[in-house]
């Protein structure tokens, strides 16, 4: 249930970026596949944490970012079908550097000028 | 109107983790974040480590738990420098909780701090605490499929452990399959197989800990 901690951090972060003259209508975030975050739980926490505040009613859009890695041995980039098998399709090494699919990133705020 | 932002949602945690790292470096203390499921043997391994290294290394422990001071009480019998951090329901430690824990330890007198994370293989992995090394612990009774089901702990650990190897004769566990599932995620991560109950394999772990503390 790290959804709660991460979504609460998101609420605080959104407040920092929201201009005083604007009303928030939507937030877009990217969630890496490796994060094991449940989007349904995150949206529920978002609704509860923003209820009764200036952020109430803003929609949280969660984009899932699939895993993609680069082989440290030969440099080949690939998107593994199974995140448990990170074998390089070119050289057969298992030395992945995670390029995408890890982390939670705030990408944009949708706002309306009041 | 759209306002574009590209910022890590855990930025604040990462900033506090950087402060912890700086504080530890200033005091010349190494720090290990020990992550593993509830019941995988983290506390028992720490007790064995503390008793083996007593008189050789000055070790402090931050024991993270949802509630209770049971772990800290067990550890305090072997180690005077232990701080319990209760997360009050939280499934992981964050950098700010560790910052408070570090404030309760005499860092200048220590060589090494172990952070025993909340028992959980998923949530703690994304939260940097300011550690020098992360250790991911699996145990025999959990089953041999845990690395494949939790790739991130394998990808982000500096060392992996398989504990409770004394139970191998009694529970179904494909040891070669377990090792292979780790090699399918990362071929360069060291794996130590040990039993804190019998002491088998413990010497390799003690060597790793000692080397980390003295570098």
Image: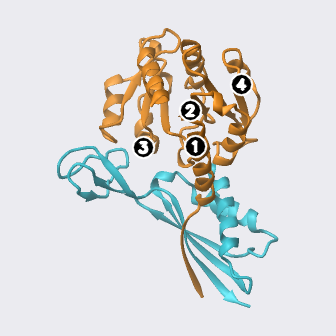
Q: What residue is disc 2 on?
A: B37
> What shade does chain B have?
orange
Mark 3 and mark 2 on one chain: yes
- Mark-to-mark CA distance, 3 and 1: 13 Å
A85 sits left or right of A45 in the view: left
Residue depicted at 47% across the width and 58% down the height? A32
Q: Position of residue B100 (x, y in %)?
A: 72, 42
Q: Nearest the camera: B70 or B177?
A: B70
Q: Nearest the camera: B4 or B164?
A: B4
Per the image, label 2 sits on a secondary structure element best described as loop
Q: Position of residue B67 (x, y in %)?
A: 75, 34
- Mark-to-mark CA distance, 2 and 4: 18 Å
Please say if the residues under marks 3 and 4 sit with CB atoms less than 8 Å apart: no
Residue depicted at 27% across the width and 59% down the height? A77
Can residue B129 be seen here? The reply is no
Mark 4 Cα shell of 10 Å, populated few (<14), some (14-19), many (≥20): many
Q: What residue is disc 1 on?
A: B124
- Give the mark, 3 or 1, whose residue is nearer the N terminus: 1
Please say if the residues under marks 4 and 1 sit with CB atoms less than 8 Å apart: no
Q: Quadrant of the C terminus of chain B?
A: top left
Q: What residue is disc 3 on?
A: B151
């Amino acid at each position: 249930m790290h959804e709660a901690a991460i979504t609460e951090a998101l609420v605080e972060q959104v407040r920092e970026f929201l201009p005083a003259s604007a009303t928030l209508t939507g937030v877009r975030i990217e969630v890496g596949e490796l994060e094991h975050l449940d989007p349904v739980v995150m949206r529920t926490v978002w609704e509860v944490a923003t209820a009764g505040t200036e952020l109430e009613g803003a929609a949280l859009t969660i984009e899932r970012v699939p895993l993609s890695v680069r082989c440290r041995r030969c440099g080949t980039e690939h998107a593994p079908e199974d995140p448990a098998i990170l074998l390089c399709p070119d050289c057969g090494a298992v030395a992945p550097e995670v390029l995408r699919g890890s982390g939670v990133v705030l990408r944009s705020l949708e706002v309306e000028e009041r | 109107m759209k306002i574009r932002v590209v910022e890590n949602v855990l930025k604040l945690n990462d900033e506090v983790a950087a402060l912890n790292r700086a504080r530890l470096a200033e005091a010349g203390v190494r720090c290990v974040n020990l992550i593993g499921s509830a019941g995988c043997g983290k506390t028992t391994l720490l007790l064995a480590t503390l008793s083996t290294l007593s008189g050789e290394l000055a070790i402090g422990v931050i024991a993270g738990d949802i509630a209770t001071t049971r772990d800290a009480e067990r550890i305090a019998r072997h180690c005077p420098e232990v701080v319990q951090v209760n997360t009050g329901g939280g499934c992981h430690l964050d950098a700010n909780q560790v910052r408070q824990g570090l404030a309760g330890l005499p860092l200048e007198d220590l060589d090494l701090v172990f952070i025993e994370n909340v028992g959980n293989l998923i949530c703690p992995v994304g939260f940097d605490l300011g550690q020098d090394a992360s250790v991911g612990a699996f145990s025999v009774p959990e089953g041999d499929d845990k690395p494949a089901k939790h790739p991130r702990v394998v990808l982000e650990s500096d060392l992996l452990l398989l504990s409770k190897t004394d139970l191998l004769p009694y529970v179904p566990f494909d040891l070669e399959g377990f090792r292979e599932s780790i090699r399918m995620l990362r071929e360069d991560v060291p794996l130590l197989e040990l039993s804190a109950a019998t002491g088998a394999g413990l010497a390799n772990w003690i060597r790793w800990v000692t080397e980390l503390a003295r570098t």
